[in-house]
Amino acid sequence: MLQVFVLLQVALLSFRIANAQLHPSTPAHYRRLPSLREQAAILDIWRDERLETIPSLLSKYRIDAWLISQREYAEDTLWWSVKDATEYAPHRRTVLLFHTNTSSLAGRSNPIRWVDNTGDVWPELRTIFDSYRPQRIALNTDKYIAFGGGLHVGEYENLMEELGEWTERAVNEPMLGVEYIAARVPGQLQYYRDLQETTWALVEEAFSEKVVTPGVTTTEDVEWWFREKMLLLNVSTWNHPRVSVITPESFPGWSGTKDVIQEGDLLHVDFGITAMERDRRPSGLKVGMQKANRMQTIVLENMKAGKTGNQVLQECLVRMKAEGIRGQIYSHPIGDWGHAPGAVMGFTNLPEFVPILGELPILPNTYYSIELYAYHFVEERNETLRFRVEENVFWNATTEKWQFVYGRQERYHLVNATHPSSFQLEAEPLLFVQPR
Ligand SMILES: *[C@@H]1O[C@H](CO)[C@@H](O)[C@H](O)[C@H]1NC(C)=O
Ligand SMILES: *[C@@H]1O[C@H](CO)[C@@H](O)[C@H](O)[C@H]1NC(C)=O
Ligand SMILES: *[C@@H]1O[C@H](CO)[C@@H](O)[C@H](O)[C@H]1NC(C)=O
Ligand SMILES: *[C@@H]1O[C@H](CO)[C@@H](O)[C@H](O)[C@H]1NC(C)=O
Ligand SMILES: *[C@@H]1O[C@H](CO)[C@@H](O)[C@H](O)[C@H]1NC(C)=O
């Protein structure tokens, strides 16, 4: 057992050297966003670029028309990825018809849009169908995938009454919504990088003595610090930050723990692992993070477009077993939504196979959140902990590899003790809080 452990450490050491450049060497900065006006213009350009892909997406899935119908406050999930930047909820009944740009509709806008409260939309739509004669009309009625199932049931019933004979041509093709919403355009990456750096800067400040006083500050204090700080940075949050003290029990963590942060605690927040440790050289904590980093690399090596999420997951689990790493993978696409459409690889409660979402293909022009943990027995603490990491990647079409957007954490963020005079910090920023 001991020998296995030692070998593993040696092996991990070489991975660490190979990947040493992935942890940014300088502190992250808060990045300023463009003005709201500039943001709106940029968002609309991205949206237009994505709309242009719809005709080819329709032909890929042999769909002639894609109909989205919704009312104000009961919008289709797709709405948020189609609307103008200055639009919010769709007004009245907003109906969108995406088409293949061929035959009789070639000259029309795509999508054709109605904002209706008189019912005129239906005869107009039937007239269009009568001339366009679509064979397969996609409706967002999927039972399982949110991004292909945004048609509200009242809207569906209404369509069935209003579309006449065309209701017989209705089909469900959830991959339309999945692929459209998941697709990234090249211009997005630089902003994604900036936001990722802002996220790192937030973590670096939150897990420093500026925010944390051991014995006084609670995990909830840090969570609310994040919330207030995000407001000042003009960004909002997808989920309430969940700050936990890592213990063998504290998982999966749908909310943070409710603890006063003590010297020696290992902390976790959604975007990374941070640490406080009493021992001068807590090598157990280092190795735990190295194992998690190695798992990220394994995921990225196996994650090829076209494979299903479950295939990748299985290959990773086999590889981990061969390397003697125990842990769990639960990675997901990220983009317009924090949990964006596309193939997932594991869920916290489904470690080996995920029905439906795990059976979708990995798509190339997307971003992924590589989220997982490695188990590691930390000798100094006499306990096995989950080393949880989550870092975002994009597909680099030049290298044909997934690449970290800003970097990945390979070292701990440090919280200095409140009495600097008693400090002995090494250059390598593992967390070390000297007991008073
Ligand atoms: C579809 O037609 C509209 C309106 O003519 C046009 O603006 C758009 O660029 C066309 N898209 C494609 C992919 O041809
Ligand atoms: C947030 O927006 C306000 C108002 O435009 C601006 O004064 C402030 O500098 C912005 N903060 C950051 C960090 O961009
Ligand atoms: C380590 O933990 C185990 C299980 O909790 C316990 O039985 C053992 O005594 C501990 N060892 C030390 C050195 O504290
Ligand atoms: C993709 O990788 C190449 C080669 O390493 C690099 O030059 C390029 O900047 C990368 N693309 C992006 C968008 O970072
Ligand atoms: C922590 O304290 C040491 C010693 O006073 C100092 O050199 C280091 O810059 C401090 N770290 C931070 C993040 O302030």
Image (spheres, helix red, strand yellow):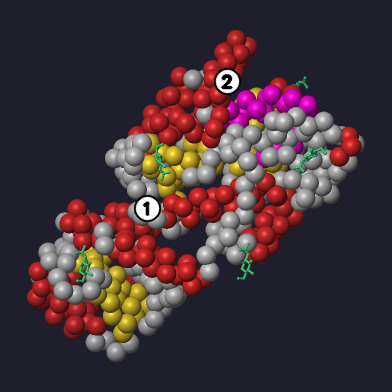
Residue 151 % position (x, y)? 33, 68
Q: Quadrant of residue 304?
A: top left
Regarding mark 1 in the picture, which secondary structure is present there? Answer: loop
Q: Secondary structure at mark 2?
A: helix
The crowd level at tag 1 (other Cα within 10 Å; few <14, some 14-19, many 20+) is few
Q: Amino acid type of disc 1?
A: Pro
* Res 55 quadrant in image: bottom left
Q: Left or right of 167: which side holds 235?
A: right
Q: Look at the image and say whether residue 289 sits in the magenta stretch.
A: yes
Residue at 16% over, 67% down: 101
Counting labels gives 2
Q: Which of marks 1 and 2 precedes in the sequence?
A: 2
Of badges 2 and 1, nearer the viewer stands 1
Instruction: Give me the residue at 9% from left, 69% from top.
Output: 103
Residue that numbered label 1 is attached to = 186
**Could you tell whether 48 is left or right of 333 in the image?**
left
Picture coordinates of residue 163, whole percent (x, y): 19, 76
Q: CB of residue at label 1: within 8 Å of ligand 4?
A: yes
